[in-house]
Image (tube, rainbow, N blue to C red):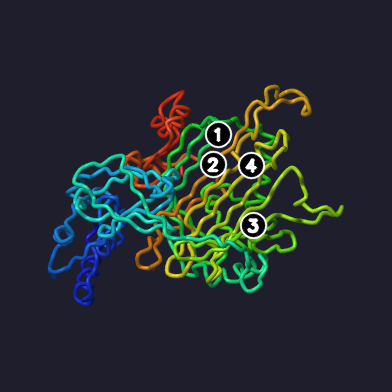
Amino acid sequence: MPVNNKFLLLTFLLTCASLIKAQKTAHFYLDSIAHLNQLELCYSEDMVNLQQTIYPSGDSLSLEDYIRHVAYESHLHIQLKGDNLIITNPNEQTILISGKLMDLSSKESLPFAHILQRDWGTGSITNAEGGFELHVPAVLSGLPLEFSCMGYADTTIIVPHQDSLNLRIALRPKPYNLNEVLVLPNGNTAEDLVRMATKRIKRNYHRKTAQMDAFYRRTGFRDSMFVQLMEAALLIEDKGIDMPSSTTKIKLLEARQSKNYLVQMDAKRKWAHKRMEELIHGGHRNTFYRAYNNPVRTYRDDWWYKPLTDYEDFKYEFHGAMWLDSNKVYKIEFERDKLYIDGRRSSENKNYYRGGYIYIDATDHGIHKMQYINRAKEGNKSQYARVLRRNTIISFQKIDNKYYLKYTKAIVYPEAKLYVYENPHANEEDRKIKSYQWAEQLLVITNIVRERQQRERIRQRDLLDKHENSFETNYPYNPDFWLNYNMIKQKPLPGKAIEDLEWEKSLELQFQDNSTVNINK
């Protein structure tokens, strides 16, 4: 380590010790050491708590002694290896807790519910089936673990002293009522409620920069068979509703992907599909950017399907009200009702339904959830009917009276052929469909950081390229990260998914084959 760097570091730390009387955290000092010496700060958030309070002391300590002092005060093991400052927990034993979260009355699973250990500041959420699996540091045994979900009373269990598997945790529903008489508030129409919700987006949606930890999963299907898997841990920086959505930054933390067994498009169709992507998504081919699909955040950017702002092309209907977690919410159905040149309206189409629902807070008119539906109507026997059954859910969470994205879940196009023909070389009118292909996509926000001093600085070189094709890019694969990742890996995949994807080789080998050590390689 260069002498002048040591001198600068010591000067900086001694100045902090003499001028700043307030308590600081281990992270403050370790980040300073790493930054001044161009080192990477390496640690696992699941195993190491860098927010413990320490009291720096000693005006004449050497660099090595100062690091030893921070390690001693914060009860951490700190090593300098090459360009890495490695922080580990000397007591890395973990306790495995797994099970399912459900409704006490109906026994139905509770997806995307929050799990939190407040003393350590770590947590997770349940998966789409209400399942969870957490690796909790053994030092937390005997402390409370909280489970919470909108519309339910919180419950707490005590972290056990040993592994506890297949737990069944039940949450008691909070009282809710459906209006027996569907009377709109203050004589407003359903469209009026949508207009008010849109008008108040700038007031209700967060206006300051927020960083979000997120989990991404994409599964590709051919009929009922799993043929593709991509998972990633992301860091998303959203600069707030006052800034264009194009300012959103995404950093890839970890990724893994299986072999892609989808039947691909030929070169000509692939070129046409790329041009269509550029038109619809502004050139964004990166699936992670497209997964951050927040129609409230981009309500002015969407150019053709705008149920929040295009009141001439949509019609609205009131579907009642309900109480959710002490919030009265109105349910509004929207349907595309565009008037064509021949006098017909799109809502009169007997074959397809294009619409959905908006859930609007009765007090502040914030949007709690949006659901987009694009499906074939009952009785439609068109060969495309199965392909066009699209369903997208965007859910929001309210923190300190501001709304933030909670999760998005969607059936999307597979970035491959929509259908596989039995006789692909026959004339178009004579072709018979053998299989259908589609994909399911999930993005879940696992943590939100709003305080500036706690946000991670995302360097320009760390940003994902919005225009790269994520399905043709190999990303680094770190098996150790996924081994203890406390997200929807809790109940990773159905057994059938593993069986379908591993017909040729194990998923672990596929993850290795589709990765690279250098992300820029």
Q: Earlier in the sequence, mark 4 or mark 1?
A: 1
Q: What kind of element bears circle 1?
A: strand
Left or right side of 117 for 378: right
Residue 54 visible in the picture: yes
* Amino acid at dot 4: Arg
Residue at point 18%, 46% (across, down): 161
Q: Nearer the viewer, mark 3 or mark 4?
A: 3
The residue at which mark 4 appears reads as 389
In this view of the protein, which residue sits in the foreground, 414 or 24?
Answer: 414
**Element marked by disc 3:** strand
CA gap between label 4 and label 1 equals: 14 Å
Q: CA distance from mark 1 to mark 2?
A: 8 Å
- Residue at 66% over, 65% down: 190
Residue with the mark numbered 1: 221
Mark 3, residue position: 333
Residue 39, can we see it?
A: no
- Please, what is the three-letter code of the amino acid marked with disc 2? Glu
Between circles 4 and 1, the one closer to the viewer is 4
The reply to whether the C-beta atoms of the residues labelled 1 and 2 are less than 8 Å apart is yes
Left or right for 309, reference 205: right
Q: CA distance from mark 3 to mark 4?
A: 18 Å
Q: Residue at x 42, y 69 (%)?
A: 400
Real-space CA distance between mark 3 and mark 1, rounded to the nearest whole angstrom: 30 Å
Instruction: Please say if 429 is above or below 515.
Output: above
Residue under circle 2?
440
Seen at 69% across and 41% down, the residue is: 376
Residue type, numbered disc 3? Glu
Name the amino acid type tagged 1. Phe
Badge 2 density bin: few <14, some 14–19, many ≥20, Cα 10 Å: some
Q: Gap between marks 2 and 4, in whole Å?
A: 12 Å
Q: Look at the numbered disc 2 and give the secondary structure of its residue.
A: strand
Q: Quadrant where the N terminus lies?
A: bottom left
